[in-house]
Structure formats: C-alpha cells, structure tokens
Amino acid sequence: MKRFGRKGQLAMLPDWISNKLDVHLLETDRLLELAQAQTPPGARVLDAGSGEGQYRRYFEHTRYTGVDLAVGDAQWDYSGLDTQADLSRLPFADGSFDAAVCFQVLEHVNEPAAVICEIGRVLRPGSRFYLSAPMAWHQHQKPHDFFRYTSYGFAHLLEKAGLRVVEMRPWGGYFWFLSYNFQMMHDRLFPRGDNDLAYALKLPLILPVYLVFFILLPLLLFYLDRLDKVKDHTLGWACIAEKLPTDEHGPTPV
C-alpha cells in the first residue's frame, strides 16, 4: 500500500501544485539554474555532499566531480560517487575547481567551518561557490544532523574562509514557513506504522486533513508569502559566494 510519505505525496500531484508545496526546492532549482548558466563548458565543478548525484544533470557540459562521505542516508545509492571522502579533508590540490555547489549539506557536517575552508581551498580565485542550508527545519538523516544557519552566521563562515558573499536569498518568508509545517499535520496526527490495514481504516480521516493541510492551505500560503517583506522567519538560505584572491584575505584559516 502506498503511504503518504512526503516524496510520494508530491509525486502524485501535478507539477504546478507540487512546485508550490516543496517551497525550498524552488530556491534550490533557481540556484542550480544560475550555476548551470554561469559555469562555462569544460569547467571543473565540485559537488560537495553530492549524495546520489541528483544535481549531476545540471553540469553535463562540465567536468563534474561528486564527492560524499556516503553515510547520510542508509536508503540512498552512493554507487555513482566520483570520490568518497570527508568534506573537511578533500583529496584535491589547491585551486583544482572552477566552481562548487553544496546544497542542504552543511547542517549534516559536525565541523562546518572546516568544510567551507576546505571547499574554498580547492576553488581557484575568482570562482563561484553555490550553496544552501536550512534555518528552520526538522531533524533529519539522524544522527547526522548538527546545525541550522542564519544569514549572518552563514556569511561569517564564508568570509572567514576567504569567500565574498555575492547574493544571499531566503527560502521564502513566514508564510512559506507555515506552509511547510502545515504539510506535516497528517503525519503527526496519523503517524505511519507497520499495519497497512489499520492505516487504510483511517483513510476517511486522513484524506480531509491531507487535502486541507497539505494542499489547500499551503497553496494559499504560497501566494500570501509576497506580503512578508522582511523574510527573517525563513526556512533557510540560498547563497552565491566568490573566492577572493589570496592577497585580499591572506592565508586560508584553519
């Protein structure tokens, strides 16, 4: 029986709806499209924390290298990794890459400053680093979940590593935050167990809650989010940073 897992729910809906429900992915897709457009053919691209390599398709015109420690999710297939390594000790020479991406990874590393410095080390001066991380998110990939980030903390870590913030963009505001949390409602009211029959008997109760809290209210909140001009109460941040020349920031800190 198909349960109401989040990925399964979104897959069952038309794109014009699902794109407005998984709101953090809107900003991730925007950042990926920018990275794709701004990275020239043949450039060396590092995908730091690449997981199953789901972003490889954006960089088919480049020399893409996916790196991951392969411990985050037991259900994932890591067989497509180009390199298995700790992100705080990358097996590449200084200035090896022309661009780097790192999406929803930094909350899962226990030494984020060391990881950002190491990614900065393997980037050549003037190259761009595209990254994102959550600020308000549930615990996931446990026990490999350590941190959440404000825009100021994010910028501080990047600047210490000799990287200049070019753009810092929130994953929506207060209404997108509400939307994401409302979508958890039916899972919290009707937690999934191993008994398919018991779950099926609850469907007359689950489906109305699902319709209201997973689809209708989040769609309304998606459009209301334009009313929040401050967006301090965001789900997370999408960022573009640029590596400065060594003479502008001195040696990379350790």
Image (tube, helix red, strand yellow):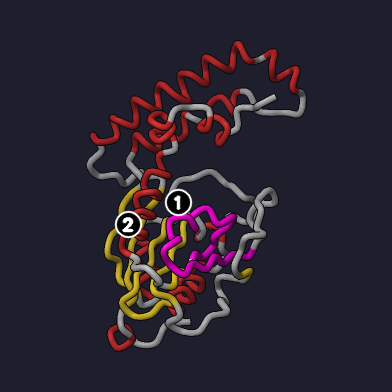
Give the residue pinned by disc 1.
Answer: 134
Residue occupying image coordinates x 44% and y 28%: 14
User: Which residue is under mark 2?
Assistant: 34
Q: Is residue 132 above or below residue 224?
A: below
Q: Residue at x 63, y 69 (%)?
A: 84
Image quarter for residue 202?
Answer: top right
Q: Is residue 57 shown in magenta?
A: yes
At x 47% / y 55%, what residue is drawn? 57
Give the CA separation, mark 2 to mark 1: 20 Å
Count residues near mark 1 (Cα–Cα under 10 Å), then give few for <14, some for 14-19, many for 20+. Answer: many
Q: Is residue 111 left or right of residue 165?
A: right
Q: Is residue 49 above or below residue 194?
A: below
**Eyeballing the image, is 6 above or below 135?**
above
Mark 1: amino acid: Pro
Give the mark nearer the N terminus: 2 vs 1: 2
Residue type (three-letter) at the residue carrying disc 2: Leu
Task: Please provide percent x and percent y for residue 219.
Answer: 37, 26
Magenta range:
47-69
In the rendered image, residue 104, in percent from the top left (x then y), is placed at 49, 54
Occupied quadrant, residue 174: top left
Q: Is residue 140 left or right of residue 149?
A: right
Q: Is 87 on the left or on the right of 218, as rendered?
A: right
Give the SS element for disc 1. Answer: strand
Element carrying mark 2: helix
